[in-house]
């Protein structure tokens, strides 16, 4: 079993839809949770960063973390064709020998069509 | 945030040769990382490179194959040695910002080995 599970999709939605992307994880030591967006032939771009459980909102994006269920989500409101990309969840623990190491999900390919 | 550049952006190499990838950051950072992203796959950590100490390699990656240098707080190199077609991947460097624990990625180096 992988430490981080993410449905690879692909996910196709119409413009304006609300998109929900999810990851589950098994390592209870993970404390920091990130969502990256990666366009084709580009490096990952940090979208959202949260620490521990709770919600964080930034414009059209909302990140949720539920540590009790080991479940994180990214919601995209009013999705746009420019949101079409691969979305990667990533997480890391707070210290120890693996300090700083990110463990990634498989990535979800999202297409928003006009 | 941090601005990260990588050289070369892409290369096509012959089997058995070596390639050195450079990573430059616009600010001083303690922790730098090298990841590999194989075609259609997510990111896998190769090693952690901290200035003033030997790089720490993840399981499945060895120094003889992927030697790393970290001469100062803004620069690192990764060498892919004795290349085979299985080394064809995107190689990415990233940095962990000391203050906020966010991790940012460079644009990647796309390597094709013939």
Image (cartoon, coloured by chain):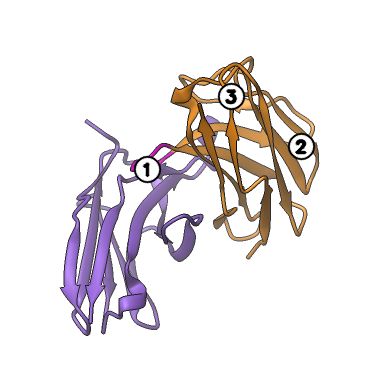
Dot 1 corresponds to which residue? B42
Relative to B92, residue B83 above or below: above
Drawing shade for chain B: orange
Q: From this viewpoint, which residue is outermost toward the right?
A: B72
Left or right: B47 with respect to A59?
Answer: right
- Give percent across and percent down for residue A37: 41, 62
**Which residue lies at the image location 22% right of the left edge and 85% below the top edge?**
A16
Dot 2 corresponds to which residue? B51
Dot 3 corresponds to which residue? B14
Judging from the image, what secondary structure is the residue with disc 2 in? loop
Q: Is residue B41 magenta?
A: yes
Mark 3 vs mark 1: in front:
3
Give the CA separation, mark 3 to mark 2.
31 Å
Q: Which residues are magenta?
A: B38-43
Considering only order in the chain, which callout, 2 or 3, is on the residue closer to the N terminus?
3
- In the rendered structure, the residue with mark 3 lies on which chain? B
- Give percent across and percent down for residue B99: 65, 59
- Give percent across and percent down for residue B11: 60, 39
Relative to B79, residue A24 above or below: below
Considering only order in the chain, which callout, 1 or 3, is on the residue closer to the N terminus?
3
Judge the density around disc 2: few (<14), some (14-19), many (≥20) Cα neighbours within 10 Å. Answer: some
Mark 2 vs mark 1: in front:
1
**Which residue lies at the image location 21% right of the left edge and 67% below the top edge?**
A20
- In the rendered structure, the residue with mark 1 lies on which chain? B
Judging from the image, what secondary structure is the residue with disc 1 in? loop
Residue nearest the viewer, comparing A96 with B47: B47
Residue A113 seen in the figure: yes
Residue nearest the viewer, comparing A41 with A86: A41
- Give percent across and percent down for residue B110: 53, 43
Drawing shade for chain A: purple
Q: Quadrant of residue B44?
A: top left
């Amino acid at each position: 079993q992988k430490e981080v599970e993410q449905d690879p999709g692909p996910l196709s939605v119409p413009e304006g839809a609300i998109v929900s992307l999810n990851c589950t994880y098994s390592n209870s030591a993970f404390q920091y949770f990130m969502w990256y967006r990666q366009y084709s032939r580009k490096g990952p771009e940090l979208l959202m960063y949260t620490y521990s459980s709770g919600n964080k909102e930034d414009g059209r994006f909302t990140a949720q973390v539920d540590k009790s269920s080991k479940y994180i989500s990214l919601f995209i409101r009013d999705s746009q064709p420019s949101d079409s990309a691969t979305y990667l969840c990533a997480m890391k623990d707070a210290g120890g020998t693996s300090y700083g190491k990110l463990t990634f999900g498989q990535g979800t390919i999202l297409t928003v069509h006009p | 945030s941090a601005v990260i550049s990588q050289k070369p952006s892409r290369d096509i190499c012959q089997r058995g040769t070596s390639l050195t990838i450079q990573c430059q950051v616009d600010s001083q950072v303690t922790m730098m990382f090298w990841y590999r992203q194989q075609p259609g796959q997510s990111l896998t950590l190769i090693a952690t490179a901290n200035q003033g100490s030997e790089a720490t390699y993840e399981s499945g990656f060895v120094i003889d194959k992927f030697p790393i240098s970290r001469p100062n707080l803004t620069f690192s190199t990764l060498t892919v040695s004795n290349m085979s077609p299985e080394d064809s991947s995107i190689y990415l460097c990233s940095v962990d910002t000391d203050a906020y624990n966010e991790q940012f990625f460079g644009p990647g180096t796309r390597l094709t080995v013939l």
